[in-house]
Image: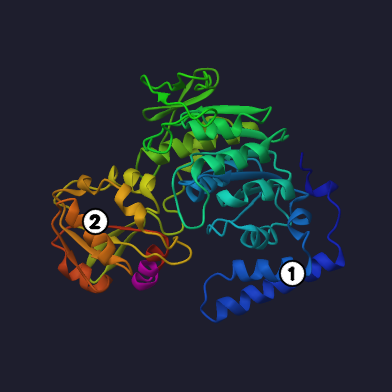
Amino acid sequence: MAGHPDNAEPLSPRAKLAVTAGKAAAAVSRAAGRGSGSVIGGRVALKLDPDLLSRLAQHLDVILVSATNGKTTTTRLIAEALRAAGPVVSNALGANMPAGITSALAGGSDARFGVIEVDEKYLAGVARDTTPRAIALLNLSRDQLDRAAETRMLAEKWREGLSGAKAVVIANADDPLIVWAASSSPNVVWVAAGQEWKDDAWSCPACGGVMQRPGDEWFCGECGFRRPPVTWALRGDNVLDPHGSAWPIHLQLPGRANKANAATSAAVAAVFGVPPQVALERMYQVQAVAGRYDVVSFLGREVRLLLAKNPAGWLETFSLIDPPPTPVILSVNARGADGTDTSWLWDVDYTRLAGHPIVVIGDRRLDLAVRLEVAGLDFRVAEDMDEAVRLSPPGRIELIANYTAFQDVRRRVGN
């Protein structure tokens, strides 16, 4: 269990030098217009002191958040909720590998809580280095097929990494892969957060048998692996706490997925003594997360910016856009941060966009165009964001983009 600032050992001269050098490298990167500098700053700092992450975390109550979708938003919601109990340091911009996490914690010497988003591949290692008090696990689905392990393999790695962990694990009981991963931990708080995308959870992670899904329940007909009893639940627009009390969710963020993120965040906050009412009231302050859900003005038009990185994310995003004939711009890249394999496009049900005027942009716009053609949709292909906006009929535009395409758009619209 992590301590608090008054009982932490002071940083060694080497660690202080590493922090200073990392901040300097980040400043140079920002001055050169290469982003926030958090990743390069963290890399420099870790080169000088490989144990720096654990040293920076020693005085914090650390909360780790990992998932395929919703990590950044949930991290932000938890951070807002926990500010009711003390200062928070967090990697709010989503730099979620060890270098970015180290950079974030270097700025939190006076914090009580460290709320940290962690890339799925690095969860076990970061947990080992930071001795978290709590770990939130939201979902696991196919993502970045060229770099991430197959989902069952990833769940197995999480299961091994969490085995015997002292942290309280707050986990989504509706995702069989999450339940399998979390079940090795002795202290789990189960949340009924829902699961819209089920295509990665039809076979049992314990034995490979076929999952049965009657109503909200699920179980394996062969080995008996099943949905555990829950202590927190999302019910419509309310969070049900362990006592059965219903607390209304009022968010400025759209969609059912964000209500689920809020339910999990409330369960995390309760671990640290923040009541659901207080936690949920603080979450209302969050209007956008690293540009996601922002409505911007561009070329005289209103454009809402939505991020969708994988099939499960696209499915959730389709459920929250305005109905037809709202114009939609889709942008897909396949750079390193996205994963270079675009075969996942064929797992997305783009027929959900029928009736929307669609314009396609991005590095891999032709890959996406083929997919939409096969889906029988009407669309146009544009060279860039400017042309896409000009081609879109009147009305607020919904722009849905994957990771680097989303960053490209944000730079272009000045967000």
**Is residue 411 one of those drawn in magenta?**
yes
Left or right of residue 231, residue 291 in this image: left
The stretch of residues the image draws in magenta is: 408-415
- Please state which of residues 300 and 220 is positioned toward the viewer in this rendering: 220
Q: Which coloring applies here?
A: rainbow
Kindly report the secondary structure that dominates the magenta region of the rendered protein. Answer: helix
Image position of 306 (left or right of 7):
left
Q: Looking at numbered disc 2 in the image, what kind of residue is underneath it?
A: Arg
Q: Is residue 12 magenta?
A: no
Give x and y (percent) for residue 160: 66, 38
* Identity of the residue drawn at 24% across and 56% down: 371
Residue ID at (38%, 30%): 237
Q: Residues within 10 Å of mark 1 (few under 14, many from 20)?
A: few
State the residue position of label 2.
371
Q: Residue 340: image x %, image y %?
A: 43, 63
Q: Can residue 391 be seen?
A: yes
User: Mark 1 to mark 2: distance in Å?
Assistant: 44 Å
Compare residues 303 and 164 and report the one nearer the observer: 164
Mark 2 burial class by Cα count in 10 Å: few <14, some 14-19, many 20+: some
Disc 1: which residue:
47
Camera-nearest label, 1 or 2? 2
Q: Position of residue 247 (x, y in %)?
A: 46, 27
The amino acid on which the numbered mark 1 sits, given as a three-letter code, is Lys
Q: Position of 290 compared to 60: left or right?
A: left
Q: Position of residue 215 (x, y in %)?
A: 36, 20
Residue sitting at x 32%, y 44% = 315
